[in-house]
Every structure is written in structure tokens, then in C-alpha cells.
Image: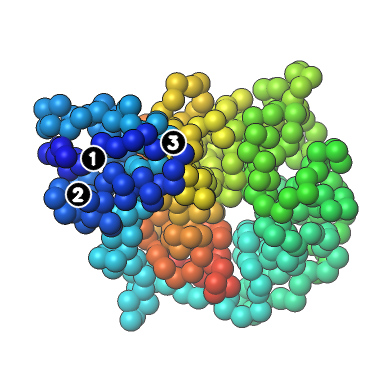
Amino acid sequence: MFLSITLGLVWTAGPSAGAQQVQRLWVENCASCHGDQGQGANARSLLRDEVMGAEHDLAFYKAIREGLPDDGMDAYDDVLSEEETWSLVVHIRELQERARREREPASRPNDDGYVETTHHRYRFERVVTEGIEIPWALAFLPDGRLLIAERPGTVRLHDDSGLSEPVEDTPEVVHAGQGGLLGVALHPEHEANGWIYLSYSHGQGDRMMTRVVRGRIEDHRWADQEVIFEAPEELYLPTRQHYGCRLVFDDEGYLFIAIGDRGRPDHAQERYRPNGKIHRLHDDGSVPSDNPFVDEHDAMASVWSYGHRNPQGMVFDHDAGELWSTEHGPRGGDELNLIERGGNYGWPRVSHGINYNNTPFQTPWSEHDYIDPVKHWTPSIAACGLALGHGEAFPEWQGDLFAGGLAGQVVERLRVRDGEIVERERILERMGRVRDVITAPDGSIYVALNDPHHVVRLAPAE
């Protein structure tokens, strides 16, 4: 056994592990010195604050691969594959997060309904607690009403008088698996033209794909519907997962549509397919002439970026002119990405996660030309919903990103400067699975929760 003083890592040599499960790799190589939960035994604990966080991932990885001769630790590049080495780093991150949750108080309201954060104290308010089923996406109308899209396919409005009945005649969706009504956005000139955009899972027999339509709400009915985006029927898939899907407009009136890989990872690299992509269209569904692959015969003309797994958060920063997205990794490796024209984000050829079945996956540090995430969450928070701070309610949060998480039951505030995360804190935690996060016109933050199915508001403390 050899002790790394720098990181506190101890590894015992053994036979090549092949594609063994991560838990078995841990037990056979690590647990005798670091404990079954990383708490430490013959070696130091891996649960110490100074070795937590994604910024230490590469140091752990290199220590295992290359060893630390000055600290008496041998290299294990001939014992463990690159994928197995990375899977053990992921396992360490999972142990660390479990320990953090056990010892740290959650960022949740006190008995008076308030939460203290680094820059602001806010009041937690439950806006809608009854009458909604799986709220999936939120948007504010110019008159102040809140539009709530529910995954089963209903659209409701909420104002001071309460929650409306479902809007009539909305499009028929396939509510199966992870499919349903998935995204909503208002046209930038909605006040003048009334256009509302919806994304949903659309079926052709037992095969499905994301479709985007626009329409207007008139006399509480969905009217004037137009199809903005749909894939050729032959590209529909008999799977019920990884739809995405978010809708965002930029400053120039272009519509961005995020679609997941639909459970077919290799499709994310095939530009002629719609899934695993972010698409860019004019507001009427026509293709902009300056899209990156518009003249390529083997690509969909609408594709803006590709190599995405399951993007479920997207927001446009109007001040910086930047499009941001969050997407689910597999087990670990959720990503925050700054979306670039024509960019390849690497899925499934690189990933910061591992397989759900507890076996190794691709290492994130192989040589490649893919665009790396600005941040990754390992372990996964199941990233879902993304908003940007603006308005007067929380002046110290201007320009910060607010990322939701389903499995993490969290809203994280992220401050990015020059492509780096300079501040990060959990401002809401363990109040329900976070499905969407938006910023209201006044700057307060609205959150759609699943389990329980509520809409809540983070409002300035009085």
C-alpha cells in the first residue's frame, strides 16, 4: 500500500479489472484503506472539504494513472483502464456528495419561510399547490399572468384570481414515458402578435419525435396553430425518453429548439438526425441562411449545435448575447454549456459520467476537438430548467445563472466570469424535484416542482 499525502489516495495493486463494475473496483482496490464510504481507514478520508469539488477531478485522475512518486504512490495505468480510472473518480464524487448532504443543512425555508444566501435573503412562497399535474414549463405573459404547461398536455393560466381551467383545443401530445408537453416560449413581440410556441412529443403510430407549433390563446382556446418544426416521419423513433426539450428566442428573433438524443446516443453525432441537437429557426419555422450546416447534404439545415445528450435547460443572456444550456449526463456528468455555432459537445464520445449499470464509460480527457462544458455536475443533479437573474428584486444576482435539478432537488446559483465559475451556491434544496426555473419580470424567481406538483416563488424578503 502507498499513501498519497497530497490527495490522501491509497490504491492496492491487483489484476487488471477489465470492465468490472465500479463498486467492485472500489472494494477490491480502495476500501481497505479508504473505507467503504471513503471515510478513511489506513489512509486519510476522501470526504475532506479540501478535496471536494470538480476542480480536483483531474488531480485524482492523474494521481491514479501516473502515481505520485514523491509520496510513495505507484502508477496504476497498467492495472486500470482509463475508463475504469475515471469511473472511480466518479464514485469518489458520489461518496463525497452523500457525506455532504448528511452533514450540511439544506438551503430551505426556516420556520418563518425565509432562506439566507450569500447575497440575498428571500421569502419562499407557494404560488400553486393544487389543481396542476406535473408542471413542466413556465412563462409570463405581458399582462402578468403565468402560463403553466403540464406534461400530460394541458396549458393553464394563473393570476391573482387563481388557477384557470385548461386552455381548450391545445395540440394532442403523446404522454408516455418522458414524453408529453415539454416546452413553452413567447414570441419576442408577443404583445403585438400573440404567438405562443409549444414543444411536445408527437406520434406517428408507435414512433415519436419532438414537434414545435405556435398558436394564440383567444377566449381561452388555442387558435391559429402552425407547425414550426417537425422531423421527417422516417426519423421518428419507438423510444420514450430523452426528448429535451426547451425553446428560447435570442435578441434577433431566432428560435432555438433543444432536443435530446431520444435514448440513441450515437444519433447525437449524426447531423442528419434531429435528436441530440440544438436547432435554430426563424420565428415562422424557416431555416436561416447562415446556419452552420445549411449547405451540407448530410445534415439537417436547422442544426445549430450537436453532440447533446438530453438538454432540459436553456436560456439566452440578452446582455452578453450568449446562449446557455444544461443537459443530463448519464450517471454523473450533467453539463452547463455555452452554445457555439456549429459546436460539437461530444456526446457520446466523451462524458464526465459513467453508465447507469455501474460500469465505466468514456473518459472526459481523451484527445478531441469537442467543446468542453463550462461546468459539470458529478454526481448528477439531473439538470432541468435554467434561468438568468435580471430585474429589480435581487440586484446582487443580476446576470447569474440559476440551474435546477430533478434528482438533486436543487436550484443552484452560478456566476460565470470569462468562462469560469467564480461563485456557486445552492439557494434552494430538498423541496421537490425542480422541473423549470424562470425569472419573473420583477426579478423574482419562479420554480416548477414535481413531487409535490407545485409552483413556488423566491421573493425578496420584506
Residue 439 position (above or below residue 66): below
Q: Residue at left 65%, top 34%?
A: 266
Q: Earlier in the sequence, mark 2 or mark 3?
A: 3
Q: Earlier in the sequence, mark 1 or mark 2?
A: 1
Does dot 2 land on a helix, a strand or a loop? Answer: helix
Residue on which the image places disc 1: 12
Residue 34 position (above or below residue 287): below
Q: CA distance from mark 1 to mark 3?
A: 16 Å
Q: Residue at left 45%, top 63%?
A: 409
Q: Residues within 10 Å of mark 1 (few under 14, many from 20)?
A: some
Q: Residues within 10 Å of mark 2 (few under 14, many from 20)?
A: many
Does dot 1 land on a helix, a strand or a loop? Answer: loop
* The C terminus - image quarter: bottom left
Residue on which the image places disc 2: 33
Give 30 or 388, whichever is nearer the viewer.
30
- When asked about the image quadrant of residue 297, the answer is top right
Residue 415 position (above or below residue 218): above
Residue on which the image places disc 3: 18
Does dot 3 land on a helix, a strand or a loop? Answer: loop
